[in-house]
Structures are given as C-alpha cells and as structure tokens.
Image (tube, rainbow, N blue to C red):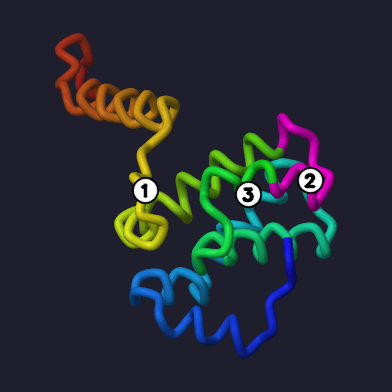
Amino acid sequence: MPEYPKEQMWKIYEQLPDELKDAIFSEETSETVHNICEKNGIEEYDKISEVARLTGHVLLGLIPPNEFQENLEQQLKIKEGIAKKINFEIYRFVFYPVKESLASLYQTEITPTKRMIQEKSVKKSEQKKSTKKDVYRESVE
C-alpha cells in the first residue's frame, strides 16, 4: 500500500462525514483495536499500531473493508486464521457501527456477516429465556 503525505491525509479526512471523523480519533476505536489484537495473540506494539493504521485507512476510504483481511495477511504477515478473526471483530465493532457512512464512502453496501446475524439471534433468544419466570424455584427465606 502506498504511503500518503500527511497533507493529503488531512485533505481526505476533512471531506469525511462526521461519524467517520469521530471513529478515526475515538478512544473507543483505539481500545477496541488494541483489545482485539491482544485477544488474538498480536502483542507486539508495532503490529498493533499497523492494525490500527490499516483500520484508519479503511475509515478514511483508502482501503475497502473487503480488502482489510488481505492487507493484514500481506502487510503484517499475520496467518490467515488469525487475520480472519481480527477482520471479523474489527468489522463488527469498528466498521459495522459506521456502516452507513462507509457505504456512502465506498458506494457499496456494508452488510453483517452470517456469523454476526447468528450471534445476534442467539443473544435475543438468551434474553427471552432469562426473562421468563422459573415456576420451579422455591423462595429462599
């Protein structure tokens, strides 16, 4: 991936929707990327910084979201399985919340993955189960 001069990056940044601007410099985004990397065994500061940089490039419109995993594998030499997990989690927690802005930026539809839909339905069914009254429980006094 080519390096962009700072001036050019700022020009690109200034033209972004506010939602993406906020996501780029958000402390939450930074912590999320850091936690995802650590969770998946990426603990070297340089690699975490590069994952954050690539995430920022997606938010800036320089790398399409569907090429994020490929960039992790090629540029950072992360194994495919780990890159896939990192891609999924960053997509879910960073890209998906700003999907409308990303979709207009890339002029493509940002859709949840099959796994995200399944997890959402599992959580809903767990919530339904937990709200039912257990008639077999005895009161403790």
Secondary structure of the residue carrying numbered label 1: loop
Q: Is residue 78 magenta?
A: yes
Which quarter of the image is occupied by the C terminus? top left
In the image, residue 67 sits, relative to residue 30, either above or below, namely: above
- Residue sitting at 53 percent across and 52 percent down? 64
Q: Main secondary structure of the magenta part?
A: helix
Q: Dot 1: within a 10 Å radius of its alpha carbon, few (fewer than 14), some, or many (20 or more) residues?
A: few
Question: Which residue: 36% across, 39% down?
Answer: 111
Q: Tell me the CA gap for discs 3 and 2.
A: 19 Å
Which residue in the protein does label 2 denote? 74
Query: Could you say which is closer to the camera, residue 110 or residue 19?
Result: 110
**Of callouts 3 and 1, which one flags the residue occurring earlier in the amino acid sequence?**
3
Name the amino acid type tagged 2. Answer: Gln
Q: Which label lies toward us, 1 or 2?
A: 1
| SS for callout 2 | helix
The residue wearing badge 1 is 108
> Which percent across, then down, holds residue 130?
25, 26
Question: Which of the 4 quarters of the picture holds residue 4?
Answer: bottom right
